[in-house]
Image (cartoon, rainbow, N blue to C red):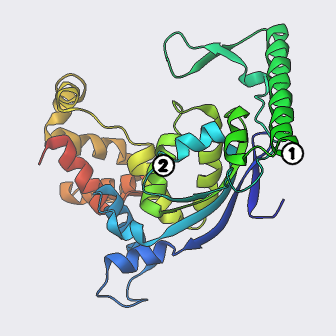
Amino acid sequence: MENNYVKVLDHGFVGLVDHMGDDNSIVQAARVSYGAGTKTVNTDRNLIRYLMRHKHTTPFEMCEVKFHLKLPIFIMRQLVRHRTASINEYSGRYSVMSDDFYLPEKEQVCVQSATNKQGRANELDNEQKLTIQNQTQAIFDDATKTYHEFIEEYDYSRELARTVLPVSNYTECYWKANLKNFLHMAGLRADSHAQWEIQEYANTMYNMVKPLFPEACQAWEDYHRDAVTFSGAEWRFMQEWIIGEMGQKKYFDEMIIDGTWDKLENKEDEQAQLRQAEKIICEKYNLSKREFTEMKNKVFKI
């Protein structure tokens, strides 16, 4: 398999065949009036994070990624739901379908979840797993034999002969999307609640894209994938029952000074203490000064 291709599942693959742009493309799209080299890398990073944090998504749409995928039809049907992507799929009307089928590994042969109507739960015992795998493979073999008999012996039309094939049959496609819509897809399909098989594809695709757009992807992880959103009612509860006295700004300032006291150089001037404390916290959590200020504004609704 080529270097830019990665094997997924038993017969599938993901190949990143083309892309357009990089982190700098996002920055230049946002700063359309600036020329290249007018800002520092650190400033570029802060701008990308600002855009992601405040959902200014148009600059991310200036970049694109294109994949070559081989995947089971039932997984393709989930991927095609992302209607902002451009897709060209292998034609079962024009060409003979693949003889490859997805056969779940033993670890994935599980019972239906009692709490999630879309998901699976605990594994079956080994004897049950083997029975299911053997019967599934027998269906694949029979469907393949019937399909080829139809098109080779009866000259049956390919567009109808394929109807005997299960949705576990592998198909291929080219899938292209801009970076904003790709990240939206990755957020949904790599989520732990998504079907395991499409998680495998989404994670593989994301791992290929991240090195091309490291700052944009890190910002997306921080502000979307790994972020937590509270409703208004939930946040009022947090402020009243958990934050408590911290709900007043002076207590928040005192807390961060106390928490960084050993590292403060100036222990006399209160304002200098606060500035030093904020700088220490920003460095520890990789926050810009603006990000820290916006975080405080969220807490106190300033």
User: 297 or 192, which is in the foreground?
Assistant: 192
User: 218 or 120, which is in the foreground?
Assistant: 120
Q: Amino acid at mark 2?
A: Met
Residue name at image x 81 percent, y 44 percent: 151
Q: Position of residue 141 (x, y in %)?
A: 86, 30
Q: Position of residue 271 (x, y in %)?
A: 19, 58
**Residue 79 shown left or right of residue 69 in the figure:** left
Would you say residue 267 is visible in this rendering?
no
- Tell me if residue 64 comes above or below residue 185 in the rendering: below
Q: Position of residue 66 (x, y in %)?
A: 59, 65
> Tag 1, which secondary structure?
helix
- Label 1: which residue? 152
Please rate how many residues cluster around mark 1, counting C-alpha atoms within 10 Å: few if below 14, some from 14 to 19, many from 20. Answer: few
**Residue 209 shown left or right of residue 233 in the figure:** right
Image quarter of residue 176: bottom right
Q: Nearer the viewer, mark 2 or mark 1?
A: 1
Q: Amino acid at mark 1?
A: Glu
Would you say residue 18 is visible in this rendering?
yes
Residue name at image x 26 percent, y 49 percent: 295
- Could you tell which of marks 2 and 1 lies nearer the N-terminus? 1
> Tag 2, which secondary structure?
helix
Residue name at image x 19 percent, y 24 percent: 237
Image quarter of residue 239: top left
> Disc number at residue 185?
2
- Tell me if residue 299 comes above or below residue 19 in the rendering: above
